[in-house]
Image (cartoon, rainbow, N blue to C red):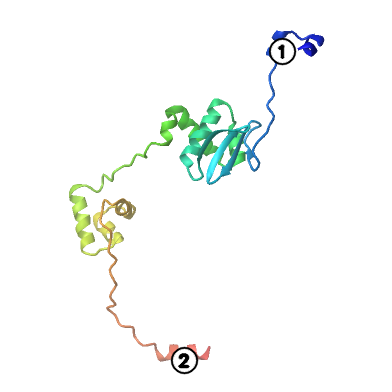
Amino acid sequence: MQVAEERGLRQTELSSMPQLQLPIFPAGSKNLTNEIAVECQNKRVVYTLGLMPIFQHAEGDIRSFRMFTSQLIDSGSVRQAEIVATFGVPIATVKRYLRLFREHGAEAFFAEPKGRSASVLKGAVRETVENLFSEGRSVPEVAQATGIMANTLHKAIRAGRLPKVKKKLQQRTQKMSPPKANAVRSIARQ
């Protein structure tokens, strides 16, 4: 205190002086900003402020990653360009999830995706499709017979709304004819 008084600094000036935080980060971490670093420890991604962990998520937890980085950007702690540079994420993706965070909050990242049902495959049309599949017809054949796109049928099969197609063995109705004598001679000459 005496040193401060000797330099002509009053007590009010001392209390308003900003305190510097040294940029000390754990070994092996990557700097996101001058204050925030990120590192992977035991298949967990850990974000630290100095040496203090502030958030962590599983290595493959993309929802938590998007939520937390959007939260950092929204609070002004990190810029979009720093997320792009550190993680190699496209800027369009960063902007998309920042907008999602600002419009719907953190819970939007963990909501189940809304699915649509195939309105084409209802009632009599669905029964017709199922009957054609039970006869052993392939997806392209059913699509052509009903006028429904093959892609729609494939999606319904993958989603479990239609039974899986049993692939039928193609029976050879024609026997292979023996090669012609001229063809055999030309092959033998080569």
Residue, x 79% and y 11% (percent of image)? 2
Label 1 and label 2: CA atoms lie apart by: 104 Å
Judge by depth and name the residue closer to the eye, 62 or 123: 62
* First in residue order: circle 1 vs circle 2: 1
SS assignment at label 1: helix
Name the residue carrying label 1. 14
Above or below for 43 versus 98: below
Judge by depth and name the residue closer to the eye, 107 or 156: 107
**Picture coordinates of residue 142, whole percent (x, y):** 26, 59
Judge by depth and name the residue closer to the eye, 60 or 117: 60
Residue 184 position by quadrant: bottom left
SS assignment at label 2: helix
Q: Is residue 113 left or right of residue 168?
A: right
Q: Please, what is the three-letter code of the amino acid marked with disc 1?
A: Leu
**Picture coordinates of residue 100, whole percent (x, y):** 45, 32
Q: Is residue 188 left or right of residue 177?
A: right
Residue, x 27% and y 78% (percent of image)? 173
**Picture coordinates of residue 86, whole percent (x, y):** 61, 40
Name the residue carrying label 2. 185
Above or below for 159 versus 56: below
Report the mark closest to the observer, 1 or 2: 1
Q: Please, what is the three-letter code of the amino acid marked with disc 2?
A: Arg
**Picture coordinates of residue 27, whole percent (x, y):** 66, 41
Which residue is at the far front?
Answer: 2
Residue, x 18% and y 47% (percent of image)? 123
Q: Quadrant of the N terminus?
A: top right
The numbered dot on residue 45 is: none
Which residue is at the far right?
Answer: 6
Q: Residues within 10 Å of mark 2 (few under 14, many from 20)?
A: few
Q: Residues within 10 Å of mark 1 (few under 14, many from 20)?
A: few
